Image (cartoon, rainbow, N blue to C red):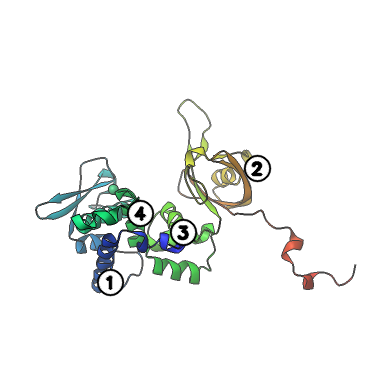
């Protein structure tokens, strides 16, 4: 399997993949195209699931009734609201994943489930594939946004696909489009007894696995993320972050995102020195 296939439906058990592809083609018949944002309520309907508002604190859950699947969204993701939030859209797509897995599962398929992926992992993969199809992502990110992992492009993709910034970051990573960059979501929190709070890492995507081990090493004015949070403007500079007990110092761009959030992109290498960037023709001819 190539890196790219790891993010596509190809990495899923074949029976699941077939069900997902069938659902997507029926969606295209119904809606005319896969152009974003995907109408996730229509997708649920085509999958044969009824979506209801649940009276529970889970993001969502899927039940099987005599008349078919029922997806129950939790208090925070009510469909009765005029518009589903970005998180609720992902939750719903994940639950549609459960409907797909359920309908794909049959005794002879059990073997194909032995791919080492849990049902939850499979449903997350289905959700990102449904909301951000790889063909559409490639067309937008690679062709229109020139394959550049910048905060502006990440925010733009989140807007176009109507998904969270974190979902976009994870999608770019699973499609192997990050080119070594790490994307971090910092969240500001102030403990009750303390006067000042701090930015803690809520999620990290890229070459790292444990966001709980990521923390800012430079403080105050030296930190891009902190400056972005305090000034509520985009900041460029060098950031030192401890990730998985390793210290990573690299070029960083951080931008505020919502009231208590900062999104930061750490690019793989430090800014090259000026002379490395220029070709010999650019050098002065004489001393
Ligand atoms: Zn689930």
Report how far apart the C-alphas of labels 2 and 1 lie in the structure. Answer: 49 Å
Residue at 25% over, 63% down: 19
Asked whether mark 3 and ligand 1 are closer than 8 Å, the reply comes as no
Q: Earlier in the sequence, mark 3 or mark 2?
A: 3
SS for callout 1: helix
Q: CA distance from mark 2 to mark 4?
A: 33 Å
Contact, mark 2 vs mark 4 (Cβ under 8 Å): no
261 vs 91, left or right, is right
Q: Residues within 10 Å of mark 1 (few under 14, many from 20)?
A: some
- The quarter of the displayed image where residue 269 is located: bottom right
Residue 119 versus residue 252: which sits nearer the camera?
119
In this rendering, the label closer to the viewer, 1 or 4: 1
57 up-or-down from 284: above or below: above
To which residue does mark 1 refer?
A: 28
Residue behind mark 4: 86
Q: Position of residue 237 (x, y in %)?
A: 64, 50
Q: Is the residue under label 3 in contact with that under label 1 (CB below 8 Å)?
A: no
Residue position for label 2: 222
Assign the C terminus to one quadrant of the image: bottom right
Q: Residue at x 40, y 69 (%)?
A: 135
Q: Which residue is mark 3?
A: 172
Distance between mark 1 and mark 3 Cα atoms: 23 Å
Give the quadrant of residue 227: top right
User: Which of label 3 and label 2 is nearer to you?
Assistant: 3
Residue sticking out furthest to the right: 287
Give the vertical position of 102 relative to 223 (above or below): below
- Measured Cα–Cα span from mark 3 to mark 2: 28 Å
State how far apart marks 4 and 3 are (Cα).
Answer: 17 Å
Spatial distance from mark 1 to mark 4, Cα to Cα?
22 Å
Residue 262: image location, x then y, percent: 51, 47
């Amino acid at each position: 399997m190539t890196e790219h296939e790891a993010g596509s439906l190809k990495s899923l058990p074949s029976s699941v993949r077939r069900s997902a592809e069938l659902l997507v083609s029926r969606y295209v018949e119904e809606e005319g195209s896969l152009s974003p944002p995907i109408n996730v309520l229509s997708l649920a309907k085509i999958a044969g699931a009824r979506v209801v508002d649940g009276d529970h604190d889970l993001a969502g859950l899927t039940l099987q009734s005599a008349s078919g699947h029922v997806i129950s969204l939790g208090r925070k993701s009510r469909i009765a609201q005029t518009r589903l939030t970005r998180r609720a859209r992902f939750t719903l797509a994940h639950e549609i994943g459960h409907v797909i897995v359920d309908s794909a599962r049959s005794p002879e398929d059990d073997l194909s489930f032995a791919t080492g992926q849990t049902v939850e992992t499979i449903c997350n993969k289905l959700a990102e594939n449904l909301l951000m199809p790889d063909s559409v992502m490639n067309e937008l990110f690679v062709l229109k946004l020139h394959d550049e992992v910048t905060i502006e492009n990440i925010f733009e993709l989140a807007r176009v696909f109507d998904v969270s910034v974190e979902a976009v970051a994870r999608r770019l990573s699973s499609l192997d489009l990050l080119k070594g960059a790490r994307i971090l979501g910092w969240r500001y929190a102030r403990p009750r007894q303390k006067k000042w709070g701090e930015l803690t890492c809520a999620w990290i995507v890229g070459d790292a696995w444990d966001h709980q081990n990521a923390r800012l090493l430079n403080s105050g004015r030296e930190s891009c993320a902190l400056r972005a949070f305090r000034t509520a403007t985009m900041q460029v500079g060098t950031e030192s972050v401890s990730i998985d007990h390793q210290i990573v110092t690299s070029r960083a761009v951080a931008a505020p995102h919502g009231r208590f959030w900062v999104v930061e992109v750490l690019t793989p290498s430090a800014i090259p020195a000026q002379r490395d960037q220029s070709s010999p023709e650019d050098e002065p001819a004489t001393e």
